[in-house]
Amino acid sequence: AEMQNQGDKASEDSPGSYSSIDSGCLSVMTGSPPTASLSRLMELQNCISNLSLAHEIVVNRDFCFKVSSPPADSLESRVTQIVHRAFWDSLQEQLTCDPPNYNHAVILLQEVKTMLQSLLLPGHVRLRSEMDEVLDMELIQQQVDHGVLDLHRLAGYIINTMASLCAPVRDPEVGALRNLKEPVELLREIFRVLGLMKTDMVNFTIQSLRPHLLQQAAQYERAKFQQILDKQPASLDNTTAWLQAAASEEASAVSARSPSPDSIGPVSTSAILNRAYIRLLHWDPQDHRYPETALMDRARMDALGRRLRTLVLEASVLLLTSTQCGVAVFSQQGFVGKLRQAVASGLSLSTSMFLNLNECRCRELTSLSSTPSPLPPSHIGERVQGFLQATLQGGPAKRSPEPPSALRLVSAELANLGTAFGRIVHFNRMVFGPFYAPILRKLLFPPGEAETEDDSR
């Protein structure tokens, strides 16, 4: 099975090997001296995989497993088809012999029994006992030896048991098994549907455990990251550089807002962190110095960053159009939707090219009209950034702030983006606050200076 995130799809075939950490960033955390033992490297890799899996379950509400299937035209797909066809063809030959050879069929029945048992809950005492009685492998082997095995009777019992255990969504597929008479096709379909049922059971278990995981998630992730840090002390180097850059930017912003050098107050650690998180939305894809503490959310942050840039472009075009075209045109039914679709199609151009075209259009229309020029995209971006900062300052328990009037036409999308962004940020601060605090203290307070604020958590 592989993990399916609606919007973020994993490509690995097993949950244990999944990680949101891309290979370039993973090397930062797993890089070890040549003398490091293989067992230590494997232990570190397992720690990262477990941490990533737990984080994905908790943070991604759409997280689930799905039965994996290689791409149709891939070498893996062709090899898999050849092997499977050879297996089922061999079984067909055995069952059509005179007398039939049930050696492989017995092995398959044992596999089916094991899969059915994995679907049983602790309360299925009677069903477990009944299954042991009907699918008694010693008895089945004796029936084979005496030529009296009734494969269709056993298949009927298996299908009835599957019907009693499956989720409602699988009822049609289980019901379709009753119409199959050819033994090989029947066994093949039983295996396929059982695989789907096992995946359903795993996803049901995850959903059931999620409320309990949320209570322990922050502590668990913090402890796991500490294990990584113990094995790889350099695992906070990128995080330190990330916070240092945000601290410099915040200090410059505070200085610019201050009326005089003497009135500059202390830089807030909370403001530094908020600025640092917003920087992740504009991260250069070619820069592999991504903060280690945010690696597991990089795919989500990158996706939010793309959505953010789209909203800035849409807001700029909508504001320009409403200003220059007037209410009569702009209020026509379907006009705004078509305009936004046109903006989205324009995103096939590079973002910088589109911004330049939009700003040029602003200047052209302004020269022909007495109407004041609307805000250019760069100013719209600043308004959006201000909205996101206000969202982070409000905290998860408070209402989302009202967006600026210039962003009114994309207010719903902006609010959704702010909520998703805030959820990631607040959980990250909850987990990694104890790691950020000493870094921020060193950045803000010289040795020996009294610390007046520590709100990084």
Image: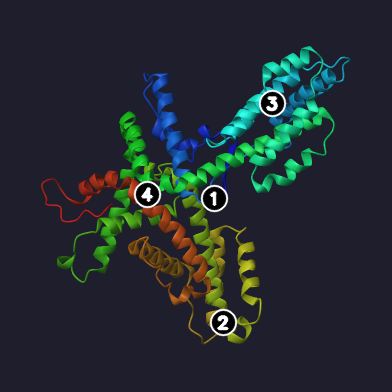
Q: Earlier in the sequence, mark 1 or mark 4?
A: 1
User: In this rendering, is residue 418 above or below 43?
Assistant: below
Quarter of image, res 418: bottom left
**What is the spatial separation of the Cα atoms under label 2 and label 1, in whole angstroms?**
42 Å
Q: Residue at x 45, y 61 (%)?
A: 419
Tell me residue 289's x, y (percent). Answer: 40, 42
Q: Secondary structure at mark 2?
A: helix
Q: Earlier in the sequence, mark 3 or mark 2?
A: 3
For residue 377, the mark is none
Residue pointed to by mark 2:
324
Asked whether the beta carbons under mark 4 and mark 3 sit within 8 Å of each other, the answer is no
**What is the spatial separation of the Cα atoms under label 4 and label 2, in whole angstroms?**
43 Å
**Which amino acid is tagged 4?**
Asn
Q: Earlier in the sequence, mark 4 or mark 3?
A: 3
Quarter of image, res 72: top right
Whether residue 10 is visible to the viewer of this picture, yes or no, is no
For residue 428, the mark is 4
Residue pointed to by mark 1:
62
**What is the spatial separation of the Cα atoms under label 4 and label 3, in whole angstroms?**
52 Å
Label 4 vs label 3, nearer the camera: 3
Residue pointed to by mark 3:
134
Circle 4 crowding by C-alpha within 10 Å: few under 14, some 14–19, many from 20:
many
Q: Quadrant of the N terminus?
A: top right
**Which amino acid is tagged 2?**
Gln
**Which amino acid is tagged 3?**
Val
In the image, taking residue 406 as reference, residue 262 lies left or right, namely: left
